[in-house]
Image: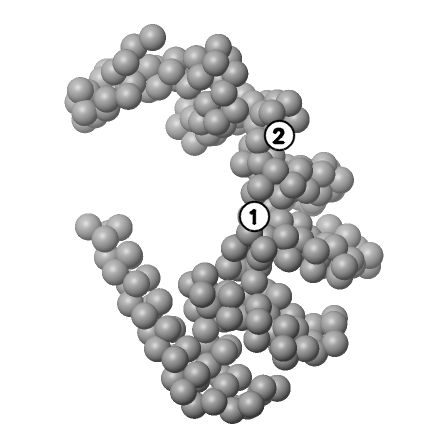
Amino acid sequence: MASSASTPYSYDLTNEEDVKHYLKNIEIEYSFHCFSEKNPDGCYRLASFYDTIKIDKQKAVKLYQTNCDDNEHGDSCNKLAKHMMLKGKLGGGIKDGKTEDIFKYHHKACQYGNNESCYSSALMNMDPEYVGENKNLKKCLEYFNIACDRNDGRSCSKLGEIYRKGSHVQRDMIKATEYHKKGCDLEMPQSCINLSYMYRKGDGIPKNEDLAEKYRDMVKKLAEKEKASTLRMSQ
């Protein structure tokens, strides 16, 4: 197997023939990891290669599904569910994307450690487009909690907002504060904003100007960090 696939700087990537050769070696390398070494991460990389570089969606989806079903690879399950969702939207309706299968593979992905699918599963359980009138708050909270326990900031922030607003649940400012604190620690600006507001106004918790200022400063720091990251990416 050509080792040059691991050393892209030996290629002139402005040269069309070099690019073709490089991509071919990448495909060979990932195929070896997947099919010869039986490496689930290698299969995922190969599927992603077909998905985003070679643009062979059929091969990509087949690999994602095999890697999910046979190897319990969470990221592959997540990508498969997202492909199914996209197929449904492009086909004019979620039903074309097989709603049950979308739930199934997002659930598997969540079970196998993919927090994005836990988050998606939570939202889907409250979305009429997927469940009609059969909203399932218990499942929604369950999936958000799984992801939050794994330090997924978005899910912690969502839980904080659900309990702060009393959205489909009894308003609980102790839980709201707890989840928003974790969300803010995980760099979710909205959680920091909400905490600053709650402490400044005494919204369900005792007023505390020092804490309000603390969380306001955290919002500023996160904004500066995001700005610096955006500048680096644009350079």
**Viewer-proximal residue among 195 and 29:** 195
Q: Is residue 201 above or below residue 74?
A: below
Residue bearing mark 1? 115
**Viewer-proximal residue among 45 and 112:** 112
Does residue 45 appear left or right of residue 222 in this picture? Answer: right
Pick the quarter of the image with the N terminus: top left
Kind of element beneath mark 1: helix
Mark positioned earlier in the residue sequence (1 or 2):
2
Residue 126's quadrant in the figure?
bottom right
Figure label count: 2
* Residue type beneath disc 2: Glu
> Percent position (x, y) of residue 20?
29, 17
Residue bearing mark 2? 72
Q: Is residue 27 above or below residue 103?
A: above
Res 94 visible:
yes
Residue reaching furthest to the right? 134
The chosen color scheme is one colour
Res 88 visible:
no
> Percent position (x, y) of residue 93?
69, 45
> Percent position (x, y) of residue 26?
35, 19
> Percent position (x, y) of residue 137?
75, 61
**Viewer-proximal residue among 144 and 151:** 151
Q: Residue at x 64, y 57 (%)?
A: 145
Q: Residues within 10 Å of mark 1 (few under 14, many from 20)?
A: many
Q: Residue at x 52, y 16 (%)?
A: 38
Q: Residue at x 56, y 23 (%)?
A: 63
Residue 139's quadrant in the figure?
bottom right
Instruction: Look at the numbered discs 1 and 2 and tell me whether their residues touch, using CB distance below 8 Å.
Output: no
Residue 4's quadrant in the figure?
top left
Kind of element beneath mark 2: loop
Q: Residues within 10 Å of mark 2 (few under 14, many from 20)?
A: some
* Residue type beneath disc 1: Asn
